[in-house]
Amino acid sequence: MTLEALPKNALDRLEWVMTDSRHATAVTDMAPNPALKILLADEPEDPARDAQITELRLYAPATDRLKQIPSRVRQLKRLECLAMGPSVDPALVASIDETSVPPGVTALGVFTSGAAATWPRAVSLPHVIDLRTDGPLTFAHENFPNLQAVSLEPTRNGKNLDAALACQGLRELQLLSVPGHEVFQKSRHLPLAKLGLLGGKLETLQGIEALSQVEWLRLHNLRSLRSISAVKALTHLQELEIRYCKKIEDIACLADLPNLRRLQVLACGDLGLSRIKPFLEKLDQVMISASA
């Protein structure tokens, strides 16, 4: 399965959830979903049913962190997308070996609720092309050498970000915290089509001009961001999301984006969007909430 074939937000909307009997009720309360199917870790195998499972989340509540990968996971021969969390014990990550994740898995999520974890240095998963994390997961390029998409919180020394940027086929980069403007220069050699700047202390987007090929950009939780004028250099940009960025002073620069088709602005207060109303009316899709 290629990255393009993966369902949108596959790691966030899985029907099959594996847990133990103690937590079955908590799973159904987690998100009301009539399509949700619970698979108990200790129930007998059912080859016909198990053959249908291509996407799976391993779940334990925050009060009882996920401490092991059930052996049954290895028997799911068609598994392509595996998400662990949201409360993975960092000790579980450290104990992973090369048999823990089925070889058919191309999309992997490791969600520790923000806790730091370290991927075992000797464990390489070249079949994983999509890696999602929500904490500072330390890993080396050799652990995930073929990434095409990654979401990560940079570690303090930035080595996990460097490891991801060493993947020559990386097309999507989501940064839960932006370490600084230098990330734009460090990633300019990559074929990035999707970029997410989802936190940090940036005041401007200076340097993003180096990524003129980006087609989809997310700006979230950038509380200090004042100027986005540099996005004018993103001549291929088609979709832009801006959330929780209330200090932007030059929103009118969006009217200079020749290929923008979809715009979402959420919880940004009064940015002066009325000044570019004629431009907004020409877009294919505009969603504005708690913003003006």
Image: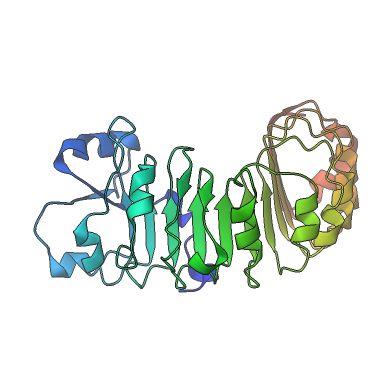
Image point (38%, 51%), residue name: 93
Image point (91%, 51%), residue name: 256
Give the x, y percent position of residue 262: 71, 51
For the N terminus, the quadrant is bottom left
Q: Is residue 175 left or right of residue 137?
A: right
Q: Quadrant of residue 267?
A: top right
Answer yes or no: is residue 237 visible: no
Give the x, y percent position of residue 119: 44, 55
Viewer-nearest residue: 95 or 254: 95
- Above or below for 118 versus 193: above
Answer yes or no: is residue 111 visible: yes
Q: Is residue 257 left or right of residue 107?
A: right
What coloring was used for the rendering? rainbow
Give the x, y percent position of residue 197: 69, 46
The number of numbered discs placed on residues in the rendered structure image is 0
Image point (54%, 72%), residue name: 146
Give the x, y percent position of residue 248: 83, 33
Most extreme residue toward the left is: 44
- Above or below for 107 versus 290: below
Viewer-nearest residue: 255 or 183: 183
Q: Quadrant of residue 125?
A: bottom left
For the C terminus, the quadrant is top right
Image point (46%, 38%), residue name: 115
